[in-house]
Each structure stands twice: as C-alpha cells, then as structure tokens.
Amino acid sequence: MNISANIEKTGLTKEQIEAYRPAVSDALDRLWSGNEPMTGWVTLPVNRNQEELNTIQEIADIIKDEAELLVVIGIGGSYMGAKAAIEALPKDASGIEVRFLGNNLCTDYYWETLQEIKEKNTILCVISKSGNTMEVRTAFEVVKPIMVEKYGSVAEASKRILAITDEETGTLRAEVSEYGYSSLVVPSDVGGRYSIGTPVGLLPMAVSGIDIIAFLDGARECANDAGWDHDLADYAIARHLLEKEGKSVEVFGLCHSRLFYLGEWMKQLFGESEGKEGKGLMPTSLTYSTDLHSMGQYLQEGRQIFTETLMVVDEPSVSIEIPGGPQKGKTVADINNAMIGGVISAHRQAGIPITELHIQKLDTRTFGQLIYYLETTCAITAMLNGVDPFNQPGVEAYKKEMHRLLD
Amino acid sequence: MNISANIEKTGLTKEQIEAYRPAVSDALDRLWSGNEPMTGWVTLPVNRNQEELNTIQEIADIIKDEAELLVVIGIGGSYMGAKAAIEALPKDASGIEVRFLGNNLCTDYYWETLQEIKEKNTILCVISKSGNTMEVRTAFEVVKPIMVEKYGSVAEASKRILAITDEETGTLRAEVSEYGYSSLVVPSDVGGRYSIGTPVGLLPMAVSGIDIIAFLDGARECANDAGWDHDLADYAIARHLLEKEGKSVEVFGLCHSRLFYLGEWMKQLFGESEGKEGKGLMPTSLTYSTDLHSMGQYLQEGRQIFTETLMVVDEPSVSIEIPGGPQKGKTVADINNAMIGGVISAHRQAGIPITELHIQKLDTRTFGQLIYYLETTCAITAMLNGVDPFNQPGVEAYKKEMHRLLD
C-alpha cells in the first residue's frame, strides 16, 4: 500500500481509538457481507467483470481513433470522479481531450463548449442513471441538434453518442433503444459518488489516456489490504471522535495542486455520505501553499471549529533545483516539504487536530488505492455516526422546488 | 449601482439591523478619515493617480506588443485579485495569455510553466512587497536563469522583467536598482488582499485585455454611492449578527462558473480580515449548480452551522435556447434561474439564513463595483466584530516554522 494515515497529531489517545475497533470490524463485515444495499463498489475491484472491461477498452480505443474531443455530459457522481482522475494522473499519448458539460447551467461555459463541438471531431458521452437529471437533460437537448447538423442526419449523429445509464429503465435507456446509441451500464448497486470504478468513471478516464487497469489494480490492493487493524480504520475512528469532541468542519489540506479536483470529489463523497440527521463534519478543501496565503490567517487565529487532514504526496514526479538565492541548491520539493512541516508545527501550536494522509506518489495505481481507501474510510465513519452512507434523502429538496418553478 | 444585497431571507428583523446603523456610520467615517492605517484602498478609485495609470497602460501595451505570454510571479493578494478578474471578465483581442507562478510549490505545475516559458516569447512580472515571500522568491530564482539562457545575457533577460514592489525598501527593490528592471509600486498603505485596484492587480488585468479604466470607474461608482443607508451596510450587519446568533461558517454560493476565482479571492478577503481572536465566519465557497450535486445533501441535512450568501448574476451574457425535450423553448438561463429559486426555497425550508447578492451583469464596470462593495462590507463587519480588518498577525506562524526547518 502506498497510502498511510497518521493520526498521532489529532490529540486522540490510543485507548480512545482502540475502543472503536470492534465497531469498525462490524462495519467492515457489513460492507463485505453482500447483504447491504448499494455496496456493490466494495467487491467491484476484486470480482472484476472482464467482459465489460474489454468493452470499455474497445469503445475507448474507437473514440480515441476517430475523435479529437470527448464531451462527457454528467454532473455529481457522473462527473467528479473522472474529472479528479483526469486532472491528477499521467496520460499516455493516445489520449484525447475530455471536456465536461451538463455539470453546470452557466451559459458562458455552454457557449465555449458548443464552439469546441462545432470545431472538433466530437463524440458525446451522456452519463445519467435515469436520464432525467435536469442539468444533464438540458445539456443533451442543447447539443443533440448541433451534432445532427454537424454530421448530417439523426442516424449519423446517433452513431457518435454513447450513453452510460441504467441497464433497463429510464428515459436515456429508452433513447438508446430508439436511436441505437452505444451504451454501457451504471450498476444498480453502486451510488453515484462511489461509481468511479464503474463505466461512469472508467470510460472517460480511458479515453483521456489513463491506464484503467492500473487504477483497478490499485483499488484491489487496497480492498485486499483493508481490515480492522489497518490505519484507515484509525482515520475513520478519528473523524468520528473529533466530531464527537465538538469539531464541525474537516479541512482537506491538499499539498499538491493536481489534487484539487480530488478535493472536490472528496467533498461529495464525505458530505453526501455523512451529512444527514444534523450530523457529519462539513467537508471543505484548501490547496497548500496557495491557500496559506489566503486562509492561513483564519486557520491560525479564527474560530477553532475544524479538524485538518493534510493530503501529502511524498515523492515528486520531477525534480526542480533552485539555482540561486538564499535557498540555492535545494529543490522546489524541499521547500514544499518545509512548508508542510511548517504548517504542521504552526497548526499544532494553535491546537488544530491534524491527520497526515501520505500518498507515496501520484501514479495511477496509487490513485486507485487512494480512492478505495477514502471510500472505505467514509463508509466506516458514517456507520459509526449511525447514518446510512449510501442514501441521499436531502438532494431532492431543491430539485422539487426547481421543477415547481419550471412548471 | 449594479450590485444589491437582499437580507430578507436571513431571518433577521429590521429592528436588529437598524440598531447597528450608527456603528456602521462610525465605521465608514473611520475608513474615510484618512487617519486609519492601511486604508489607502478606500480613496484609491476616487483620487486616481493618473500618471501611474498612464504608465501601467504604456507598460501593458508594450508587453502585449512584444510578448506572447506574461508570467506573473505572486501569491495571496499578489495573485488572487488579478486571477479572479481575468477568469471572470471579457477581454479585448489585444490581450495576451497571463499565467501565474509562485502561487504554489507544486513541481508538476512548475514543470508545465517552465516549458511554456521556453516555448513562448515571455515577459516576467514579479509581485511582492518585500521580495522575500518564499514561494515568490523560489519561483523567481528558478525562472531567472531560464530567461538568461533564452535571451542570451543577464542584461537582455533583465529588460524582460518587471517588478511590482515597495517603493524604497526590500530585496526586490534592490534588484530593480542593480539590474535595471522596469518597476511599479505597491502602495505602502494598501494591504495585499485590498490591492486589486493598485498596479498589483491592474497590470496583469491590462495585459490580459481587460479595460482597467472601466474597472476603476465601477469601483468609484461604488465608493461614491457608499453610505450608512446603503444595502451593503445591511449585509455587513447581517454577517455580524448571524455569527453572534451562533453561525460559524459562511458559504458563498457562486451561481456562475466564471465567479470561481472571485470566490477564492473572497475567502482571502473575509478570512484574513475577520479570522482573528477566535472570531469570524469561516468563509467557504461552492459553485452552483455543480456543487448542489455534491454538497447539496450536506447543506440540506447536515450540521446547520452556516449562513449562505448567494452570488447571482442576473443577466446572462448570451442566450442559449433548449430546442427539445420537456423544457423545450426555455433557455439555459431560465433553468439556472429556476435552480436558484429552488435552492432558495429548499434551503429556507431547512432554516438556512440566506443573503442574495445580485450582480446585474458580469461586465468590467460591474466587477469593479462588486470588488469595492465586498471590500467595504468586509471592513465594516470586521470593525463591528471588534477586530482590525487590515492586519494578519497569524500568517507568520507557519512561515517562521518553515524557515526554521530550512535552516
């Protein structure tokens, strides 16, 4: 495993942590039992569907050969995971540009994307379990006629549309039947925020040039390694206890700028899994050292309502030496490490509980480990908090009001 | 004024707000008195230094003519303001690419930027009051020899370096004297987070093709309009009262994706001005509707520790109609407006206090108004909270520890 959590600087004692080990063991048993709803993601990297993986690779190869641009129409769990991976990971030269749409309702952004679609040889990939998500449906309806105009007919446009949706039901599956789009399946036992290891995440990643088998290998390594005695259990317990002790926010301090969208993905994972019944640490992310020059003052001397989880990449992918000035001979990574050490000391002096989450290096296999590690941590903390990690009863509230306003 | 705040949905009463009007009036008097330290930004858009503005425009014109890329080396207040403007605003065709460096210590990001410098005709702009900020110094030392190699000599490279720094003191000013860099001045009575209207923000904005006179005109309109009876005072008072009533986080809900970096700039403005002595709302930002599909569950049903400020752009810059499906004939902006209405209803049902901050349109003059509006709001709330809006005693803590580790 290239991932490790260190909770020594949280101020929690060994005894406090140990007391929760049986509860974590129970939680892991439940996750692996096969009897809990929406836990399909747990065994996915271990019991792979090789046939489906072959299909994903084949479709990705065709797209990379035939197109310059893949426009993925998706939002939430149908967007964040692939986006996080594409921003963080190395890609081989065969990969093409992947751009997202339907992840917002911003006309300026629409406009730019529509220009790109008009200019570049484009494939559309629409991702939605039902096909009814308002943002996704809006984007799809706007883009479809542009594809028809560009490629000459509905039939030709339809050849360039791939749908990732429910196997049987929903508007989008019905359109697949009617127009003959290619399609892949969103598994019914995996929720959106846990779906990066399904076609939802894997297809866009593969098209961008990411080695999805290495990603799944990493996830499997973490799955096989996970157990009650693993340090991810420590982290999960610490999160539960820190909230119990009065913290209400978790700051993810991302110490590498390529992790920015991972932070966005983590906000959905943790916020949507744990934020219910008036409970859960409110997740927020900062990128260091950038944000030490904006939020540093607040962290040091503002309201001490938060715990901090530092996401540290230990080995830089490239070495850059400083050729002059007071730090001559050191590398940029040396300065970054000193910055991280400085943050830890200063924040400990302010009494902030700190978890260090070390990522040995930012490669695809390690990223696969990390995703699975975080998903498992999150599920365990939610279960310790007594909430269901896999539902999201509150997300319908604004949608209901929005539909009322549109009708 | 194209900016207005509506605090009707905060749950605060008129009486509660009215009670603070004399205190706001006092705060505004202090800001405008000329006797308070670091309040130079207050009168800057009104008492313009026309000579300096001419110089900024001339330098920007030369850079745009001669270079393909401006690399701005700066962090915090020497980065955020210009970045927020460049991401949000329309630019004329004469503008060139502006890229930032020294805003992080990420080797991957360095690597990409160094490749760009090698490939493109580049001007460097180093922004630092002292010249000693570690991130900025590191980036400058790494880039200098690349410029020397590329342009053949120290003298030729120095012609392509512009420093924005203290008028008299500091390492960077000394280098200006030694190597003959062009230079502009960081005023001594304006702090970093309030410096967007000084050469720090204006020069990069002008090079990117933004009309900086329109920006300053907007700021002046807001300055001339500000008074105790203005609705920005309502917003400032509401922020103070909501914290007093037990809220500890302010969520800036950005309803336009081009406002993302404005949200980052706001986090520095509010967090660094107010986060001291264990006080201040912790600022965080979300982009809607994207983040309703990640943090929506938490907002609706998680810990109710936050107040929400919706940043709404009323007029879209372009109209995009939906040609099919259930919303046929509506525009993307219609759906966005329904989304905003849906959020307001759903969040009010959850008891979240909401301020609506309306921005009539996202043009440069309005952006100038908005910046000044937010700066004034922030200064007033900080003064109501009894803290100094213009110092940042806590930001040195991690730097001290970092330097200790490097020595």
Image: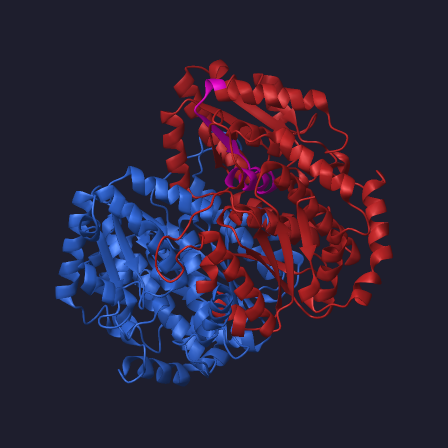
Chain colours: A blue, B red
Left or right position of A397 against A349? left
Q: Is residue B75 magenta?
A: yes
Left or right position of A215 against B25? left
Examine the image and state in which quarter residue B386 appears: bottom right
Against A177, residue A12 (above or below) is below
Against B41, residue A131 (above or below) is below
Can you see residue B299? yes
Quadrant showing the N terminus of chain B? top right
Q: Is residue B241 magenta?
A: no
Examine the image and state in which quarter residue A136 appears: bottom left
State the residue lying farthest toward the front.
B329
| Residue B347 percent location from the top left of the image | 57, 69
Q: Of B91 and B332, which appears nearest the observer?
A: B332
| Residue A63 percent location from the top left of the image | 19, 48
Residues drawn in magenta: B65-87
| Residue at (51% x, 61% y) in the render | B338
| Residue A297 percent location from the top left of the image | 64, 52
Left or right position of B398 against A83? right
| Residue at (50% x, 38% y) in the render | B102
Q: Of B245 and A230, which appears nearest the observer?
A: B245
